[in-house]
Amino acid sequence: MQGTPRPIGRLVLPLLLWIASGSPCMALTLDEAPAAPGEWGYHPAAGAVCATNPPSFSWRPQKALRWELQCARDADFRQIAYRADNIEFNVHCPDRTLPPGLYRWRYRGRDGQGQYTPWSKTRSFTLPAEAVSMPLPPRPEILARVPRAHPRLFVRPEQIPELRQLARGPMKKQYDELVRQCETILRQPPDTTEPARYPPEMERKSEAWRTLWWGNRTYTIRALNSAATLAFTRLLGGPDEYGRQARRILLECAAWDPKGSTGYRYNDEAGMPYNYYFAWTYTFVNDLLSESEKETCRRVMQIRGQEMYEHLCPRHLWRPYASHSNRAWHFLGELGIAFRGEIPQAEDWLWFALNVFYNTYPVWSDDEGGWHEGASYWSSYLDRFTWWADVMRQATGIDAYDKPFFSQAGYYAMYLMPPGKVGGGFGDLTATRTARNNAPLMTTLAAQAQNGHWQWYVDQLGGSAPAGGYIGFVRGALPAVESVRPDDLPASRLFAGTGQACLNSQLFDADSSVQVVFKSSPFGTQSHGYEANNSFLLWAYGRRLLIRSGRRDIYGSDHHQNWMWSTRSTNCITVNGIGQKKHTAGAQGRIIAFETTPALDVVIGRAGSAYEKPAKAAGSAASILERFDRAIIFVKPELVVIFDRLEAREPATYEYWLHAVNTFDLAGQHQIQVRNDDVLCEIDFLAPDNLTFTQTDQYDPNPRPRVRLREWHLTAETEGRQKQMEFVTLYRPHRASENLAGQARLERLPAGYALHVSLSNGELQALLPTSEDEHLSAFGMETQGALQIRLLREGELTETLRAEY
């Protein structure tokens, strides 16, 4: 007998309540999407061998979740070696080391109602016995280490008596220089009127805007650095008047609108130095401030510091590639220390900064020590980071230089800019940089790492250049380092993590050597390292021969964006006039092979996917190219061979770009010469035939009128439209007094090319493959898909190299 039907409402209401209560059908999901370009990624990556113990962990963030992390010895997570719960950020560094060995890790999220996501996929990593010990102490322990009294930045209160003794004794010379600076400040005190905002009618990035934008930075630094200098010198025993004037400047600057012309979000180039110089002065002059004056300073810095924090946290932990943010985070850490216990949020600021340092630093490099943004930004950003290293060590006992990166960081300058070099390679603001510009930072790095090679480099640049002012006084006499000439190092080096290879004939003197710098970078063309992948630079005997072109008039100007960020501005190749994607992490290349010997270097880069898509393929994300591999063979010091393999999705024309300081002397594709002073380079396009050449000294577009620089741009365009194209180009750099004329013979074979080049005292034989499937043979050599090279001197085989694609 059928029962009486129940009302629908009686069924629906309990179901809704069951769903709302957190039933399995409403379980939290975990977003495990792979990291996209511009995202930090999952660390340790599957199969990683970690350089630090414990490793730092990172995973994709999700809003409103806390996290649990587990590390286990076994695949089933029955042998838990480490567990952490209630983790605030999507990064974590354990507070203790783990025994060496193989581990697996996973994580999951938890919401405010106590519901958990599923566990993530499992990833394995290995901790070798030699991994550097770098646990992050727990938050309460870190906070307890920060002095309660002032000063807290660079020095601790208990160190002041010793510093005063040094000022009267071994460091009296440095102290007297500080006094001289202070007396100058008293005679010519800085203006403390609040800087002007941008007028409403002012065009952003205009010349007037640029003047005000940067002028407000220098104005702010002049005021508050003067205050910090006065305040610190008074701590050493200087006249009380120094302290009174420091206090006056500090309080007058405290009256500026914290979100006005020097606000961090309004103009971070003024806002960042305001914040750190204000914090330094506040802690140096703290004992002269009344309680109400301290409260005034705290109110100002609470607004300014929280503005930085909300901009950086948590975004920077997953998307850390904004250039300015990579100095802002440690300036925020300094504020956290200066105002710990005085501003409620200050402890969060410090804890965030330490999590950045342990888990997502350095951003523009890896443990091998390169720097994606180039030598100028390497120097600028690391120099300011050393302030944080000093502050962090004194306030928390953490030594930044324990990071493996700092055991390699100085080699970047050594290999990229040997002594005497002019020109800092790829990256913004490097064209006129000299090796001597590296001396101050290298002095610090050599001392901190006790690296004799770096000290040798500093000595060749004219000797140590320690920091001056109060920072130099605090650092005192850096520990001595014994200089070691780098005879035991190879002349060339690959910085694989940043995709740059520095090929040198020798490291000792740029005026006596030849250098090729090559880029094919997993960082792409983003930020200040915007040059195209598979592009190269050539220096010889102290002169720039083939260059990256243009001059930044202001960041993001028409010239900067549409010439300097363009593939056309580099020694590279465009296809149907189309270059690589501009200024993006998505335009990635990578170096797939690197071999070096004292006589020969070979490097191969791959960058086909970095190119823009064809105009007609509006709905496609594909590059115009299916392949662009560039191989460079360097026979030291007299010959550079560049072999390019390109394959387009459709038949295309190809434009080969070269750039120089002076005009190219063009007598045909086998007789091209470029000259800079008494150094020349002979250029021979062996393949393809029938190239059409044009050259100009105009950029497209030109920089603003105040930049009068003009350089020469040579374009070689192919005949007809072809889907597959190869270029084989020879470069012979030499002094004008030398004659390096020699024969070159290129033979086209079914599977590639056989190249023979006469040298001053020998010959080069090379097999250049165009197929991975067919065998290529000549000169008694055979290869299938790999570059094969032989170097003969006086008829005897001296070197053999093979490089796989």
Image: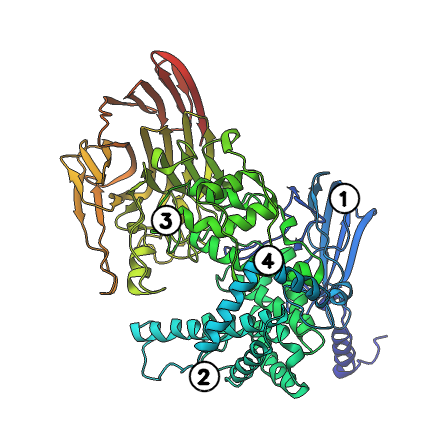
Q: Residues within 10 Å of mark 1 (few under 14, many from 20)?
A: few
Q: What element carries label 1?
A: loop
Residue designated by label 4? 171
Real-space CA distance between mark 1 and mark 2, rounded to the nearest whole angstrom: 62 Å
Q: Do the residues labelled 4 and 3 touch (CB within 8 Å)?
A: no
> Quick one: label 1 or label 2, which is nearer the N terminus?
1
Question: Which one is in front in this view, the residue at disc 3 or the one at disc 2?
Answer: 2
Residue 545 vertical placement versus 803 (above, below): below
Q: Is mark 4 on a helix, strand or loop?
A: loop
> Quick one: label 4 or label 2, which is nearer the N terminus?
4
Q: Are marks 1 and 3 in contact (CB under 8 Å)?
A: no
**363 lies left or right of 693:** right
Residue furthest to the front: 169
Residue designated by label 2? 194
The image shows residue 458 at horizontal and vertical percentages of: 48, 44
Question: Which one is in front in this view, the residue at disc 4 or the one at disc 1?
Answer: 4
Real-space CA distance between mark 1 and mark 3, rounded to the nearest whole angstrom: 43 Å
Identify the residue at horizontal 22%, vertical 54% (top origin). 710
Amino acid type, residue under disc 1 in the picture: Ala
> Quick one: label 3 or label 2, which is nearer the N terminus?
2
Amino acid type, residue under disc 2 in the picture: Glu
Amino acid type, residue under disc 3 in the picture: Ala
Amino acid type, residue under disc 4 in the picture: Met
Q: Is residue 463 visible?
A: yes
**340 lies left or right of 376:** right
Q: Residue 532 carries which label?
A: 3
The residue nearer to you, when weighing 389 against 630, is 389
The image shows residue 322 at horizontal and vertical percentages of: 49, 62
Real-space CA distance between mark 4 and mark 1, rounded to the nearest whole angstrom: 59 Å
